[in-house]
Image (cartoon, grey):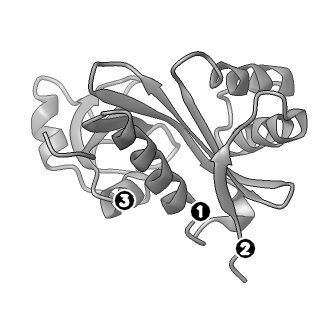
Amino acid sequence: MTPTFRIVDLASDDTTAIDQVATLIMAAFPGWTTTLDEARREVRESFEPGRISLVARSGNDILGWIGAIPTYDYAWELHPLAVRADTRGQGIGKALIAALEERLRTLGALTIYLGTDDDGETAGTSVWGIDLYPDPLAHAANLEVINHPAAFYRQLGYSVVGLIPDANGPGKPDILMAKRIAPA
């Protein structure tokens, strides 16, 4: 059964929701933070001036979280996106991205971009486990998705715009993706 949810701003004084988001990011991104206190600090960073922090809520339950960081005059970084494991595949991630894109359009953004690591133990894409030098852009142009979040972002109109070779260790790149969200 698909949960009923709404997308709202994460309130900086909602400690219960902040704890749920902190637990969510620890589960979704193993190794990003090692303690609940570290994860809470990451969530609290999303309340810094100019940043956006949205959650998918079903009653008091947090089902997903998305944030954005202003980094250029007209481009924002999507950071991060996490959906609770037991609710994935139910449209929550897509709804969070759609809400974020709409919010950014109203702020005058033209582009949203993100980095999605290929740092697992097995190949998530065709660029995992190989030396991307001397021509990372040729590898980016021919990137194939095996089992990786890049497939989800591609479905939503995001394109691979670059690679950061060895960002997470030898043969473990960061894949840069972007999408124009408003007419130039």
Q: Residue at x 27, y 37 (%)?
A: 111
Which numbered disc, 2 or 3, marks the residue that appears first in the sequence? 2
Which numbered disc, 2 or 1, marks the residue that appears first in the sequence? 2
Give the x, y percent position of residue 177: 30, 41
In the picture, the quarter occupied by the C terminus is top left
Give the x, y percent position of residue 67: 55, 36
Q: Residue at x 55, y 68 (%)?
A: 91
Provide the secondary structure element on which disc 3 rests: helix
- Disc 2/disc 3 C-alpha distance (Å): 23 Å
Q: Which mark is residue 92?
A: 1
Classify mark 3: residues with Cα within 10 Å, few (<14), some (14-19) or many (20+). Answer: some
**Front-lying residue, 111 or 165:** 111
Q: Cβ–Cβ below 8 Å for labels 2 and 1?
A: yes
| Callout 3 amino acid | Ala
Give the x, y percent position of residue 95: 52, 61
97 horizontally vs 177: left or right: right
- Disc 2/disc 1 C-alpha distance (Å): 9 Å
- Report the residue marked by disc 3: 151
| Callout 1 amino acid | Ile
Give the x, y percent position of residue 39: 76, 27
Q: Cβ–Cβ below 8 Å for labels 2 and 3?
A: no
Which numbered disc, 1 or 3, marks the residue that appears first in the sequence? 1
- Disc 1/disc 3 C-alpha distance (Å): 16 Å
In the picture, the quarter occupied by the N terminus is bottom right
- Report the residue marked by disc 2: 3
Question: Residue 152, relative to residue 183: is it above or below?
Answer: below
